[in-house]
Image: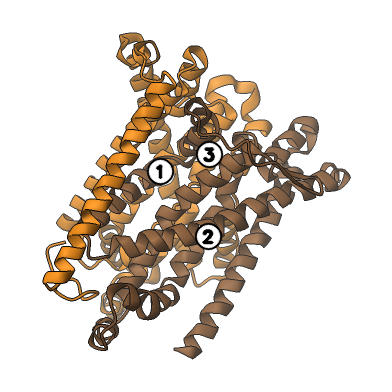
Chain colours: A orange, B brown
Amino acid sequence: MSSQSVLFDAPGPRTVARHRVYSVVTVVALVALLGLVVWRLAVTGQLEYRLWEPFVTPRYIEALLVDGVLTTLSMAGAAVLGAVVFGLVFGLGKISHRRWISGPSFVVVEFFRAVPVLLLMIAVFFSWGITRGDSGAYWSVVVALTAYNGAVLAEVFRAGIAAVPKGQGEAAFAVGMSRTQVTWIILLPQAVKIMLPALISQCVVAVKDTSLGYAVAAPGLTTIGRGIYQGFQNQVPTVIVLAGLYILINLALTVLATWVQRKFVGENNPIALQTVDSGRAV
Amino acid sequence: MAVNAVLENSDLVLVAFGYTLLLFVLAGIGSLLLGSLLAALRVGPVSIMRRSVSVYVTLIRNTPLLVILIFFRIAGPKVGLRFDFVDVTIGEINLNAVFTACLVGLTVYTSAFVCEALRSGINAVPVGQAEAARAIGLTFGGAMGQVILPQAFRASLPPLTSVQIALLKNTTVAGAVGVFEAFARMRSLTNDYTTQTYGIFLAFAVIFVVLVEIVSFLSLRLERRWKVAR
């Protein structure tokens, strides 16, 4: 933190000394914790080469990257594409002035936001996907994530349109555009620019949620990981590698979102301010 | 009727939601406590603490909950991280090592999001409040505990509510790794009554919708009460 926080004073000499003690204590505690972790790993034999061998074996690296990372990304990508369409339909539906459109849209959005993704995934899988093997499981995950992320995006679209300065719509009405024209030609293009970072952040949620496909044995990174640790009994190394891969993918997405934010939106993003990431994994 | 399976097994469904609610309430309290501590360190004056909490939050937030639960439930025991000292039975609900491992995982995961929500709340506290607290000679701890955090809690009530609602839905992930809560029960019912898939799903889904609405309603009442006090 470069700027002085208002939460505490510029420290005097005694406070500086005390903070130095705190820093040293923290460092010692962290080092001790790290030491404890490494010691436990060593004592329980988790550092043996045998357990880590799969992660330097080309066949398994390929499985992790192709069947794992690529499938995960393609599931998340398909779900986000579907969610954008879903969100657009029901987000615009919610702000429609026709009651028979806005009412049902509201119910659909609220329902899919409140229902855990896993329940939906299992329902789709048992009623449709179970007889269709791997692709059935794959599409069960995509459909469930589409519905959930779509419901979230519907709210983002609504907020995005609400965040476009009011004068824009008023001016468009003033020059004689219809309500549909105003929404599609004036409001949406501007709203999309504001929403882009929130959209990319939602991709992080989608990537994390594809791991739930594990419950219906859908392909993807976590399922590949399970195959590896069941074969080699190397649960600890596998979890570390899995977490590392997910973190790398998601950090890349976060960097992209920040870049897009800076490039297209600027510092004050009304949507980013409204939607604090709540960690809705499900 | 399409929901016969749920009605016939209402006792099992009840126990399942008992697990769900227990996970939710216990992990909810745990994550609020741990998250507040993290948030206080995250904005504190000691830079090394700020940085380590920031690293913790980044790592946890970008890992899927399922991977974290697999860590505590399946990988942890391999390095001696066991919870088998816990064995409590309340009625038909048995709180064993599996339950506790999932409880710890959910708490660890949710606390990272509580920390972020609180931090946004701390940013929303007017600067004058912090300055006044400092002016009357409160230390960082005093200012945080008596002036900033109480107001930050009020300001971050809406995002905190979303985090807790997310936790309520996230408890279903524990069902994927062995706790017999609502999701696991729904899966077994769907397996046994293959013709009633939609009815069973709708019944469970509606219960979740009701639970979510109850949490939102309580939060809204709290928000209204606190607004008056402000």
**Could you say which disc has been placed on residue A80 in the image?**
1
Q: Chain under label 1?
A: A
Residue at mark 1 to residue at mark 3: CA–CA distance:
10 Å
Q: Kindly indicate whether the residues beneath marks 1 and 2 are on one polypeptide chain.
A: no
Which quadrant of the structure image shows residue A121?
Answer: top right
Q: Kindly identify the amino acid type of the residue bearing the numbered disc 1.
A: Val
Residue at 82% across, 49% down: B91
Mark 1 neighbour class, 10 Å CA radius: few under 14, some 14 to 19, many 20 or more = many
Residue at 22% across, 65% down: B45
Q: Report the label total.
A: 3
Q: What element carries label 3?
A: helix
Q: Mark 2 points at which residue?
A: B164
Q: Nearer the viewer, residue A139 or A42?
A: A42
Q: Name the residue under label 3.
A: A143
Please say if the residues under marks 1 and 2 sit with CB atoms less than 8 Å apart: no
Q: Kindly identify the amino acid type of the residue bearing the numbered disc 2.
A: Gln
In the shown orientation, is residue A273 left or right of residue A263?
A: right
